[in-house]
């Protein structure tokens, strides 16, 4: 008989047991093991590379991104406000900072005299929430209310809070429309909250746009066959892992559908600054916030639309301050009795970390006169754009691989065509073929990617997510590592019938888009 206090996998929450987060899953864990091996003499001889390229996660600073000096000096001053008792000239010389940075720190300390060591209001500093509201209003051209802003530890905490709230009164009551491919935070949070994922698909050959027919079909099928109620549509724009940017027309159509069926919207917009031109000289895609499009929709219709929860974070964009954990949630068209419950959820954790709140302040209200800071952010963006272009071009040249244009976010999600013999080998090892592919890529080249099955994908397709964050000095070498590995895999496992079938499919896909196939067969 099992003791009543036994602690094992059978006695813990089964929702926790079933939840998965591939971004830090099998392949990244193996990468950590290899990294430790490389530190030993035997390990250094064992592998044909000297370092791991952590292309599995959007963690810019681990890949060498430089921080904003203005931001870090601002953090230093508000964290140690006794420095502000010194004359301005002495402070500027001490930190090599601008007068604007000193003035900004003084203003923050004056508005928040308790300092960064004290708990804040559960929604965060009012001074920062006002800055967020002003940023949203300037971005969208429509008002934003600071009382509807909640500062959080990154966007993830806000996402999990809203999803928990909408999951329904009883286990299994709530369902969420989940884009495929999806970011694993959402599938994990749905599982943890005993909710239901209702899949709708993105159209790979249309730049990973929303398949509106699939979206409507998923809703109709669920209504007829399921007991749970769809509570919210989840959107990630720009897309993770897809690297897509949704058009205004697509977002408008999604609002129409949500309005028709009484569904709320969760809009993850943490990559809103990351939109890239396909090639040098071409126009960049425009990011439209769901709030802006919804307000325009309401103006045209003359009435309120669906409830909207929007998320943003300091971890992405041009800052990459993942470890400082700052972000915000904006609620729009959400009833007051519901926002009261959101406030309660945030109150349970007392408040988000104060340094993260300071970083949010910088993100939404960057310095006006610091030319060095502007130059730094411009250089970060331009490098990301060049690397997005290099990755799109480089992967599409690889035989038996295709990659939609990386027009947003920090990722490519190429489709990898695999020989039947390799797929069978993966089956023998009781492993998904793209997982085995990523493990072999890692062990051969040091490149750590994430298999597409961790994000979910259409049946009978294989993908891999990789970031654009490798240092630009080594970026062409990074792309070449992937290319060489893929070609060698096909030399080892491929047969003529596989080659003919896959080549035909790839060429037909490009022809359907009116583009020549760039693969170097």
Image (cartoon, helix red, strand yellow):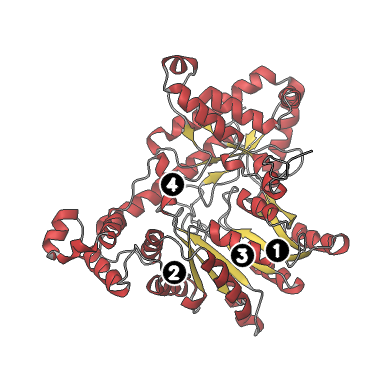
Q: Give percent across and percent down for residue 45.
A: 45, 14
Q: Give percent across and percent down for residue 348.
A: 54, 65
- State which quarter of the image contains the C terminus: top right
Residue at (38%, 65%) from the top-left corner? 361
What numbered label is drawn on residue 162? 3
Q: Given contact means CB atoms under 8 Å apart, are the residues at marks 4 and 2 in contact?
A: no
Q: CA distance from mark 1 to mark 4?
A: 37 Å
Q: Nearer the viewer, residue 19 or 49?
A: 19
Q: Is residue 470 above or below residue 119?
A: above
Badge nearest the viewer, 3 or 4: 3
Q: CA distance from mark 2 to mark 1?
A: 25 Å
Mark 3 vs mark 4: which is more N-terminal? 3
Q: CA distance from mark 3 to mark 2?
A: 17 Å
Residue ID for mark 2: 124
Mark 3 vs mark 2: which is more N-terminal? 2
Mark 4, secondary structure of its residue: helix
Q: Is residue 381 above or below residue 392?
A: below
Residue at (23%, 66%) from the top-left corner? 100
Mark 4 vs mark 2: which is more N-terminal? 2
Mark 1, secondary structure of its residue: loop
Q: CA distance from mark 4 to mark 2?
A: 31 Å
Residue ID for mark 1: 167
Q: CA distance from mark 3 to mark 4?
A: 31 Å
Mark 3 vs mark 1: which is more N-terminal? 3
Query: Is residue 458 visible to the viewer in this orientation of the structure?
Result: yes
Q: Give percent across and percent down for residue 169.
A: 74, 68
């Amino acid at each position: 008989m099992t003791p009543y206090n036994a602690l094992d996998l059978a006695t813990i929450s089964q929702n926790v047991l079933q939840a998965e987060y591939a971004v830090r899953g099998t392949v990244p864990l193996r990468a950590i093991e290899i990294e430790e091996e490389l530190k030993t003499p035997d390990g250094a001889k064992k592998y044909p590379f000297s370092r791991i390229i952590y292309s599995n996660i959007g963690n810019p600073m681990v890949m060498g991104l430089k921080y904003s000096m203005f931001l870090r000096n601002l953090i230093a001053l508000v964290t140690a406000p006794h420095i502000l008792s010194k004359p301005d000239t002495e402070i500027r010389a001490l930190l090599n900072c601008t007068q604007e940075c000193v003035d900004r720190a003084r203003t923050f300390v004056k508005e928040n005299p308790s300092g960064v060591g004290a708990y804040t209001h559960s929604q965060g500093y009012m001074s920062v929430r006002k800055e967020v509201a002003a940023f949203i209003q300037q971005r969208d051209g429509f008002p934003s209310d600071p009382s509807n802003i909640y500062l959080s530890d990154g966007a993830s905490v806000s996402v999990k809070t809203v999803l928990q709230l909408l999951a329904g009164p009883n286990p299994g009551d709530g369902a969420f429309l989940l884009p495929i491919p999806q970011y694993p935070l959402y599938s994990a949070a749905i599982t943890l909250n005993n909710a239901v994922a209702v899949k709708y698909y993105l159209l790979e050959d249309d730049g990973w746009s929303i398949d509106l027919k699939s979206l409507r079909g998923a809703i109709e099928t669920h209504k007829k066959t399921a007991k749970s109620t769809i509570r919210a549509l989840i959107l990630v724009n720009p897309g993770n892992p897809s690297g897509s940017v949704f058009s205004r027309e697509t977002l408008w159509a999604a609002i129409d559908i949500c309005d028709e069926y009484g569904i709320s919207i969760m809009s993850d917009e943490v990559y809103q600054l990351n939109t890239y031109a396909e090639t040098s000289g071409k126009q960049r895609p425009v990011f439209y916030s769901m709030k802006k499009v919804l307000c325009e929709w309401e103006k045209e219709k003359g009435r309120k639309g669906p409830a909207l929860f929007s998320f943003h974070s300091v971890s992405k964009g041009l800052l990459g301050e993942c470890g400082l954990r700052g972000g915000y949630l904006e609620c729009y068209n959400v009833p007051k009795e519901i926002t009261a419950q959101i406030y309660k959820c945030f109150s349970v954790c007392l408040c988000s970390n104060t340094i993260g709140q300071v970083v949010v302040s910088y993100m939404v209200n960057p310095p006006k006169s610091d030319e060095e800071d502007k130059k730094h952010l411009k250089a970060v963006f331009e490098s990301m754009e060049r690397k997005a272009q290099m990755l799109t071009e480089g992967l599409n040249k690889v035989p038996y691989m295709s990659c939609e244009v990386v027009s947003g976010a920090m990722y490519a999600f190429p489709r990898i065509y695999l020989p039947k013999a390799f797929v069978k080998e993966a089956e023998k090892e009781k492993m998904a073929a793209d997982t085995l592919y990523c493990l072999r890529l890692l062990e051969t080249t040091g490149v750590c990617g994430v298999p597409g099955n961790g994000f979910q994908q259409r049946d009978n397709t294989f993908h891999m997510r990789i970031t654009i964050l490798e240092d630009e000095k080594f970026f062409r070498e990074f792309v070449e590592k992937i290319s060489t590995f893929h070609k060698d895999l096909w030399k080892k496992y491929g047969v003529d019938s596989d080659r003919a079938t896959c080549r035909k499919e790839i060429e037909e896909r490009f022809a359907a888009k009116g583009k020549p196939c760039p693969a170097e067969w």
